[in-house]
Amino acid sequence: MKKKSSRKKSVRKRKNKKPIFWALLKSRWFLRSLLLLGLAFIIYIIILDFQVRSVLDGRIWSIPSTVYARAMELYPGAAVTKTDFVNELKRLGYQEKRDIPTGAGQYRQWQNNVEVYARDFQFADGHQKALPLHLAFSSHGLETVQTLYKRTQVSLYRLEPPRIAAIYPQRAEERELLKLDEVPDYLILTLLAVEDRRFYEHHGIDPVSIGRALFANLRAGRTVQGGSTITQQLVKNIFLSSERSLLRKINEAFMALLVELHYSKALILETYLNEVYLGQDGNKSINGFALASRFYFDQPLAQLSREKLALLVGLVKGPSWYDPWGHPQRALERRNQVLDVMRQLGVMDDSHYRLFKRRPLGVVSRHHLAANRYPAFIQIVKHQLFRDYSSEELKTAGLRIFTTLDPIVQEQVNRSVTRMLPRISSDDALQTAVIVTSAHNGEIRATVGDRDPEYAGFDRVLNAKRQIGSLAKPVLYLTALQQNPKLTLASLVDDSPVQIKLDNGDIWQPENYDNQYRGNILLYQAFAQSRNIPAVRVGMAAGLQHVVDNFHALGIVEPVPAYPSILLGSITPTPYEVAEMFQSFASGGFRTPLRAINDVVNQQGKVLKRYPLEVKQVMDAAHYYLVNYVLQTVTRTGTAQAIARNPLTAGRQYAGKTGTTNDLRDSWFAGYSGQYQTLAWVGRDDNKPTGLTGASGALKLWIDIMGHIPDRSLNVMQPDNIRREWVNQKNGLKTDKGCRDGVQLPFISGTEPVQTSECDSPSLFQSLKSVLP
């Protein structure tokens, strides 16, 4: 009986279990909890789906705008030395070879010859194909340009422009975008073989790969293989942090499934190829295979050989661990592992496998992509761009900005600043601003805004406001000649003390720099010798408002009050404005606004904006010729006569003007040749005296710059209404050619002196002529 009773109890217990389970299922609490969990999961998926689609449906990347220098033009007769050309090739990352170049981006040199396989490039005005060239140089420049093999003449070829900077988004990433059909097939095969062989079979996560990786890791006792698909890697790169947690892995898996649900395999693969992290360039990450190709090999992706593609694919596993510069042996072993995989899969035959495995890594020397080595110039580029584009556009839209910078000139300016400032003064607080432009069109070739040319701090070219001193005199003398038709370079002007009553009743009594007075002197002498008193008298006679108007017409933007002191340069423009003012003289009397940009192109190659040459005549040819004549005299016998005496610049014709302000606080020189206009300023930020005049400071820097860059003499055509006459320097009257005090000056027809002066001091030639039969 007892056994039967025990059996009944056991059966009763088993029967009671089922009702308890069903009771739990039927309980409201359980159903509510299950419903809430289900609702939470749905919301979770909706949120993940929104994150995925909001990014992938729009622009995924913030692409920095790339800034290019000018493209070097190659044509017979170009003023390009062999040294300059080879340096340009090195700047562009071309590789020097001992044998004839066989691929784009290679060159060899011997004697006066260079053979180069120039790369193709998409310019703003069209695509230029890669071309092998033979160039012959002489001491004068480039003699011949021919195709390398057939030796046919080439009239013009442009090298691709060097990348000089990039304008980055907040998250400093570098990237070049490629469409899937632009990616080498071999790279795709290699990538899929190494990273995700079942890419076209799975739906975002791959249980087979996960199982295979788990087995391999357990057998090795450590993590030796990953099971993440390319889709998962893409999700991790774009959406997730690098933390390792169960939640992150869950998010990764579900987001990968959602990505595969909404987007094609082609789009996923293309996005991955442009997104994958492949290295670090300082504080900037290198993303995508296209940019990695340039970063490690300085070649376009399409031109890489198979072993180089294998190295890039190998870097996916760990760019820092396999860094080919920091850990070349690891990188070599990893590359060879990738080659092993390709041979095992039959993608590569044994002969190619052995060939590629013997080759070195082939990476170029460690360098920085788009490093901003020219901060002052880039500041001007941004200044001009911000007129047309928002900061966000510049940092995210991937614009290509083609500029006017000439690296040859810029690097010489950098060297001159670094070399000359310590020679000019031992004062470490001495600062400088330099800007070099094309004399004809105002294109900015180089600029420096600090004694350290690569310092990206306060840019004195754009932001320093300094008195200009005697640099104002060309403007006031131009105004005087325009306002008074009877005034000539031979007119007598009074160099004696003057007092001027100001509007507030005060008396202004200017002085000459040397505190000496010479009485009546010719206007051209007063101008060339930078005498203050004659300048004040001439300027007041011309009318202060007319002088103010000319300052603005020539390029000074800041307000200029009509005070007498402006005649001696009390205005405080920036060096950029002063350079623009003198550009009008360098350009032959035409206002030519300075330009740092030629074209802005979007990612699709469409030109968004061109920055054409703007020209406005601000002085007629005759008045320009008269002022230019005196500015040339300044560089021969005036305050800048050191130009004619210095071996670096002797033998060339220049025009220019020194500038010195009160208490020797600012030292200026602005001058131009047949090719360049260069402005140099030297001073202290705290405005304390430097002890330097324009001639002892800025002029020395200017000479060192202009004496070391390719240049040509200034040659100004004489207008038809200009006549030259010999005049007596003591009284301005007409005289004979042989008189010792005679000087030949230009005059506008009808203004030349009629009255003559006897030759009371004949030259030796005149004396001999009078006694010879």
Image (spheres, rainbow, N blue to C red):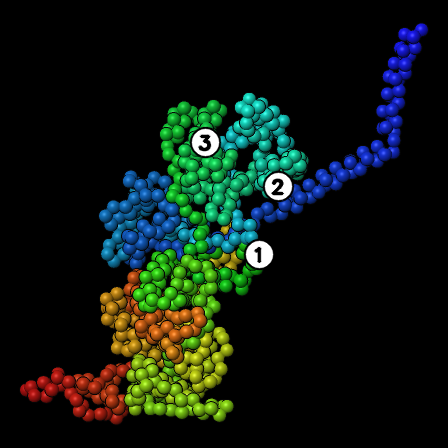
Circle 3: residue type: Arg
Q: Is residue 38 above or below residue 70?
A: above
At horizontal 56% and vertical 39% (from top left) the residue drawn is 272
N-term-proximal mark, 1 vs 3: 3
- Secondary structure of the residue carrying tag 3 is helix
- Of labels 1 and 3, the one closer to you: 3
Q: Is residue 235 above or below residue 128?
A: above
The circle on residue 392 is 1
Q: Position of residue 312 (x, y in %)?
A: 47, 37
Q: Residues within 10 Å of mark 2 (few under 14, many from 20)?
A: some
Q: Is residue 637 left or right of residue 355?
A: left
> Disc 1 marks which amino acid?
Glu
The foreground one among 209 and 398 is 209
Residue at 67% over, 44% down: 51
Q: Residue furthest right?
A: 1
Is residue 497 visible in the rendered image? The answer is yes
Q: CA distance from mark 1 to mark 2?
A: 24 Å
CA gap, disc 1 and disc 3: 39 Å
Quarter of the picture holding the N terminus: top right
* Residue highlighted by disc 2: 240
Locate residue 301, reporting x and y percent: 45, 40
Residue that sits furthest to the front in the current view? 2
Q: Is residue 757 left or right of residue 238?
A: left
Q: Which residue is mark 3?
A: 334
